[in-house]
Image (spheres, rainbow, N blue to C red):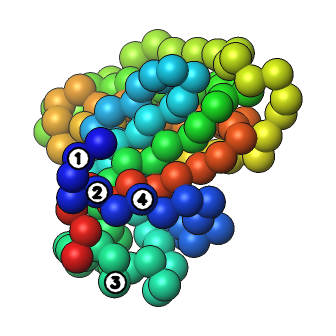
Amino acid sequence: MRKDTLVIKDCWDELLYSGDFLRCFESIAIVDNNLIMDLTRGLHVSSKLKPLFKKTGIYGDVGNCRLLFLNIHYLKIKIGPFLKIGENLKTLSLIEYEHKGKSEKPGDKFGFEGYFNPDAILQAFVDFECDAERFELHILDPA
């Protein structure tokens, strides 16, 4: 973990769903039975959390953070890749991935959606469901 990272535990209810705004994933990885998702922008948070972020986007969104789902029981990810060239879109084959974690007992259920590379030619819509024991938000460049 980076030295300047601010860790906020069990704050899933402080993340706000905004269906018309893109959460912009930089990476998704499973490490030691934990799901780690890096976001560059597009995350909406409560007024309680917003002052903890150094930068706020023009739509009130924040980014430069990591979502951690600890001790996964179950994970399902759908990735819908597509090419965007100018105004033309070409949909590619849907990728679905399921992962049975090492945790024996079910935890809390989480769900999220967003985009990989929203400004690139090759992009992807991402939708996930996760059952994990705990959630943490890591602010990588706190205020």
Residue 42 visible in rendering: no
Instruction: Residue 91 in the image: state x and y as whole percent.
Output: 39, 23
Determine the residue positioned at 75% across, 45% down.
109
Determine the residue positioned at 41% across, 39% down.
37
Amino acid, disc 4: Val
Q: Which residue is mark 3?
A: 51
Amino acid, disc 2: Thr
Amino acid, disc 3: Pro
- Nearer-N-terminus badge (4/3): 4
Q: Which residue is mark 2?
A: 5
| Disc number for residue 7 | 4
Amino acid, disc 1: Arg
CB of mark 2 within 8 Å of CB of mark 1? yes
| Distance between the alpha carbons at the discs numbered 1 and 4 | 11 Å
- Picture quarter containing residue 69? top right
- Nearer-N-terminus badge (1/4): 1
| Distance between the alpha carbons at the discs numbered 4 and 2 | 6 Å
